[in-house]
Amino acid sequence: MSEAIDIKAGSEESTGVDTPPSYVRPGSEQDKMVGAIPAANDLPLEEINPVWNRLFAENRMLEYFERLRRDDPVHFNETEVAGRYWSLTRYEEIKAVDTDHVNFSSAHGITLGFPIDQPLPEGALDISLFIAMDPPKHDVQRKTVAPVVSTRNLAGMESLIRERTAKVLDSLPEGETFDWVEKVSIELTTQMLATLFDFPFEERSKLTRWSDVATAVPGGGVIDSEEQRREELIECLVYFTQIWEQRKVNPTGDFVSMLAHGEDTKNMEPLEFLGNLILLIVGGNDTTRNSMTGGVLALNEFPTEYEKLRANHGLIPNMISEIIRWQTPLAYMRRTANSDCEVGGKQIKAGDQLLMWYVSGNRDESVFERGEELIIDRENARQHLSFGFGIHRCMGNRVAEMQLRVLWEEIMKRFENIEVVGEVERTFSSFVKGYTSMPVRVTRLK
Ligand code: HEM
């Protein structure tokens, strides 16, 4: 999420941000490659680079990760723009690095970025957000906003979420094809965000737009250029600065009120404020949205599991963990080595980037038998890597699980079947693993 929203700190009075020129983003180099994607087993290992948006958009990444787990589980790449980086593809090494924040830093960014020993290109100074910080700053900022998603706060929100979910499901057309992503996944996650931010409800689609803009690859359908991203994110900052001013006077218990009143956050710089907003918007948006879509898709791909669910709604909580494993909404997180070290028998140099490919660890057969399949009563589904581990473990995991549980409880009360009736379109990103559309038809229970 950090490099995805690089903007330059400057001195303009209104926002503290000035205009950056364009630059090549790390991880976008391979997008220039045209033609059919080769089979993973046909390529020499040194030609394999999993940071390739098309692999994800065309749903070809799993065979690449299978190859890497088998033949080169800690895999090296070096590119002109990103420098040296390693892909960790097995469960064991991913968990070991994720839980070791002393040796592996988040402070240089959590997606593939520029080499840390070189000056950033003009226009690419990172804005600051706590997912991309180390202790002690990380811990202080996380502690400030964590109460919004505490179990107690969530319990109070469940009935409102259920009511909103029911309303969306009741409004779905029967007997005609519609886009599940637009009508259900986006709508529900946006409503949830509006609740967490106490955001003007009728303007809630702005939140979805800002989340999409923050993580989009220019030219991939959402934005055309870095310049456009910068402009739209500044709009976001300006809008939220007004809300901040209001909440300073009248706190309402939402994320912004907590940031505006927190001892350690109330004097945040504009870019730090923007960073934390984006983190909470993106964190709670794409991820849950794509799990909502992924669940329906997976039950269509594995119809005997759908049968199991129809026969036993008590499987829903475990199924939610399994859907989140199977989907893996964020394909990886990055760390940077603080010193020379060894991971999986490979010599890592200080400053090297390490990509913890959760999407691959979640298919590691030594932990998840028949890992490519959705098995809704899988015993160890909760051991999935999708929320990460250690001090950065997803802060919103209970919100996400609650939202998905409520959604499936309400779905099973209403629908005999949700059928995927056409091609699914996938997000052009090797970081956000998701969908842009999925045509479905629903049949209500008689
Ligand atoms: C299925 C849904 C979700 C998935 C798969 C997911 C995944 C993740 C992952 C992989 C991380 C980083 C873990 C690490 O580096 O070890 C993370 C961190 C985070 N997530 Fe989520 N997330 C989800 C939903 C949410 C929601 C709903 C929110 C907010 C309401 C949220 C807010 C955050 C925040 C604030 C962090 C940063 C935590 C830190 O650095 O201490 N996430 N999430």
Image (cartoon, rainbow, N blue to C red):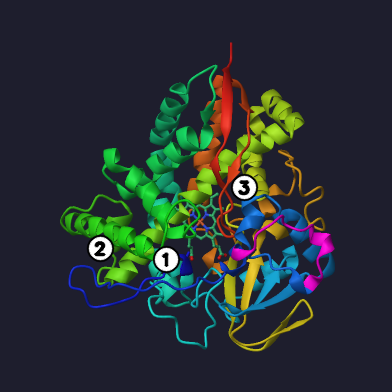
Query: Vertically, is 26 above or below 413?
Result: below
Residue 156 position in % (x across, y down): 39, 40
Residue at the spot 75% in from the left edge and 71% down from the top edge: 47
**Image quadrant where residue 17 sits:** bottom left
**Looking at numbered disc 3 in the image, what kind of residue is underneath it?**
Ile
- Stretch in magenta: 32-45
Q: Is mark 3 within 8 Å of ligand 1?
A: yes
Circle 2 SS class:
helix
Query: Vertically, is 133 above or below 415?
Result: below
Residue 268 position in % (x across, y down): 28, 71
Q: Is residue 99 visible?
A: no
Residue 357 included in the magenta stretch of the image: no
Circle 1 packing at 10 Å, graded few (<14), some (14-19), many (20+), is: many
Circle 3 packing at 10 Å, graded few (<14), some (14-19), many (20+), is: many
Disc 1: which residue: 5
Task: Report the residue that reaches farthest toward the left.
Answer: 249
Q: Quadrant of the C terminus?
A: top right
**Looking at numbered disc 1 in the image, what kind of residue is underneath it?**
Ile
Q: Nearer the viewer, residue 426 or 287?
A: 426
Residue 39 included in the magenta stretch of the image: yes
Q: Nearer the viewer, mark 1 or mark 2?
A: 1
Q: CA distance from mark 3 to mark 1?
A: 25 Å
Task: Report the residue that reaches farthest toward the top.
Answer: 446
**Looking at numbered disc 2 in the image, what kind of residue is underneath it?**
His
Residue at the spot 70% in from the left edge and 23% down from the top edge: 311
Disc 3: which residue: 324
383 relative to 183 in the view: left or right: right
Q: CA distance from mark 3 to mark 2?
A: 34 Å
Q: Earlier in the sequence, mark 3 or mark 1?
A: 1
Disc 2: which residue: 261
431 relative to 370 in the view: left or right: left
